[in-house]
Image: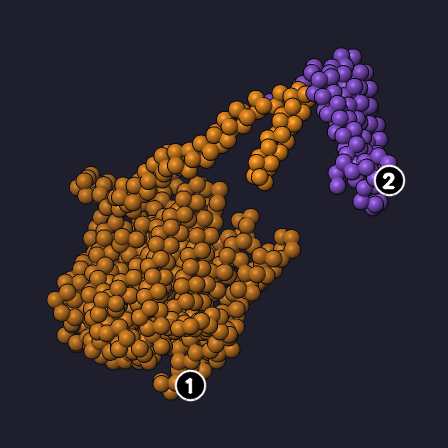
Chain colours: A purple, B orange
Amino acid sequence: MTGAVTHEGVPLVAYLAVSGILFLLGLLGVMIRRNPLLLFLAVELMLNSANLALVGFSRYWNTTEGHVFALIVMVVAAAEVVIGLGLVVAVFRQRMALDVDQMSTMKG
Amino acid sequence: MAALAWIVLGLPLLGCILLALWPGEPDRRITRVVGVGMPVIAFVLTVIVFAIMVGRDAGERGEVTTLWTWVRSAGLDIDLALLVDPLSVLMMLIITGVGSLIVLYSAEYMEHDRDYRRFFAEMNFFLFAMLLLVEAANFFFLIVGWGLVGLASYLLIGYYYDRPSAVAAAKKAFVVNVIGDIGMIIAAFLLVRELGTLDYLQVFATAPDGLGQGSGAAEAVAVLLFVGAAAKSAQIPLHTWLPDAMEGPTPVSALIHAATMVTAGVYLIVRTNVLYELAPYASDLVAITGGVTLLVAATIALVQEDIKRVLAWSTVSQIGYMIMGAGLGAYGSSMFHLLTHAFFKACLFLAVGIAIHALSGEQSLDRMGGLRRHLRLTHAAVLVGCLAIAGIPPFSGFFSKDEILAHALDAGALGVALAVVGLVGAGLTTFYMFRLLFRAFWGPEPDGGYAHTPHNPSWVMSAPVAILAGLTAVAGLLQVPGAWHPLENWLEPDLFADPGLEASVSGEVIVGVASVVLAIAAIGLAWWIFVADPDRRTRLAPALPAARQLLADQYRFDDVIEDAVVQPGRDLGDSLTGRVERYGVQGSIEGAVASVVCAARGLSVLQTGLIRSYVFAMVAGVAIIGVVFALAVR
């Protein structure tokens, strides 16, 4: 079944491939970048890759749950970005460098 | 009759609750009315109970009245029940009668005390506890009453709680009494195991078959009960608390530590006379303990300088007579001596209390003297009390003490030996009592005279002393050997076991003549030393320094107990805190804490604060789990 080209167009495997690539890019971004803004960008990328997979599956099984769930994820992501950017601004106001490696006071 | 017994028991409790819960500080008149009124009403009702009982046939005088069943379990029922019979009514009459006189006396004696209300609340509480002790119909409530009088005694000895010596004395009394409580509780366990009941009448009915004459169980129960009796009645070696208990106010000494509570041990032995008849060795132990105690206490009393301590040692000695009599099977005589002792010792304590009160709390014999010129009535009362305790006819002590000794003479070799001890003790008793009388009331006034002229009290204090002095003078006529003995007849239904001990006429005559001769000789000696020539005392004082010191140290019982019991206990406690607690308990906990802290410190290295390293760890973890699952599925 996987990889089969349906008459409706793009096969599921393509969605999943793009989703997987996007997720890996996001993960690498989180692991490599040090600027918190870019970190958020990378996290958003991962969330959206998950959304893409959800929508892809939803369409494949002809159900609506995946769509609904993707919408909820977007709402949560928006809220998360609001808080995250608020934190970034607060950190910036403290005249600290925008570098997550230097924000390491919470350690054992 | 049964309902009245409950009311008698409840009235002092009501008085205690009223006084304790009265909002704010009640007016002294209210305190007086409640605190004195309740015991007096209880006494009147007791007299009515007594009158009803006199009207009945001897066989129908005992009555058990049950309020409710308190415990019902397999093999053991415990009722909240009272046993009203000749013995308990006799005790109730003594407790409420002497108790009423003493609380009346306290109304004036304690007048200058700021805790007036607490005093009367605690006195009423004591009367309730003591009545519960003597009215209980089973061993369970006997032990409850036994414990509660111990508590009341503790509270009242420590009445002046800002005096460290009073607090220490209260603690000592409580601890020693708890030793006795433990003995009684174990005795009760044994009774439940052997007979399956704690009810007096059932125990007494089944004991001869259930325990058996002279059996180990009977001896054990009797000895364990005697541990309780000895602790409460201050018998050697559990006697050291009573002289210290004189730290309490004088009315407390008179009521609790002379007339009633300390004689509870005698009551207990007489009450359980069936068990003692089954246990001859335990009875001998009781008699010997009583004999030793009476002699030891009488010798210690010879050298005491504190007037109340003389009386305290005298109490220990007199209870020794009662215990000795009870051990020899002369239960009626013991109760007779208990009755007369309650009168003459309460009389002496209250009269001496007047002297102490008049001298603003002075208790040392050295700073007394010549008081008879100031306190005539008190002097007369003390003289009557001394004559009674010395056994000069026709005062009460002559009849009651001699009856015990006469019974002892007929009780075999041991009895004869104890009778001789008792006679010697009687001579010593006469000497130390007249020493007290002569030094405090006769002779010269102390150097420099009195700061204030000793004042006579009002009728509130004089009347109880006068009444008790009157009773002291005549109570002995209740039983005249060879003529009549109503008290013994009265107690007959309670003396289940007949020891077959009847004082012979020759014994009565021998004891009577010997004790009177001894008493007169002792009075003469005391007069020769203390009155005839006041300087003779100072000249004789250095004689026999070692013996005097030994007596002044009270045979070093306190030191021996300190070394043999208290110090090992303290050492055990120290080693437990220092070693077991420090390394065993505390150490294991500290070790556990330290290891957790150590582990946490090691693990906390992983918390770097670097988000990227966390992410890497998470990804690595997920990857490992994925690999494991993948391998597992395959």
The chain letter for the residue carrying disc 2 is A
Which mark is on residue B24? none
Mark 1 residue element? loop
Q: Nearer the viewer, residue A5 or B152?
A: A5
Whether residue B557 is visible to the viewer of this picture, yes or no, is yes
- Horizontal side of B210 relative to B514 (left or right) equals right
Q: Picture coordinates of residue B21 (x, y %)?
A: 61, 57
Which mark is on residue B55? 1
Q: Quadrant of residue B134?
A: bottom left
Q: Amino acid at mark 1?
A: Gly
Query: Which callout, 1 or 2, points to the residue nearer the camera?
Result: 2
Q: Quadrant of residue A90?
A: top right
The chain letter for the residue carrying disc 1 is B
Mark 2 residue element? loop
Q: Picture coordinates of residue B398 (x, y %)?
A: 26, 67
Residue depicted at 76% across the width and 12% down the height: A97
Q: Which residue is mark 2?
A: A7
Q: Nearer the viewer, residue B416 or B203?
A: B203
Q: In this picture, is B93 found above or below B317?
A: below
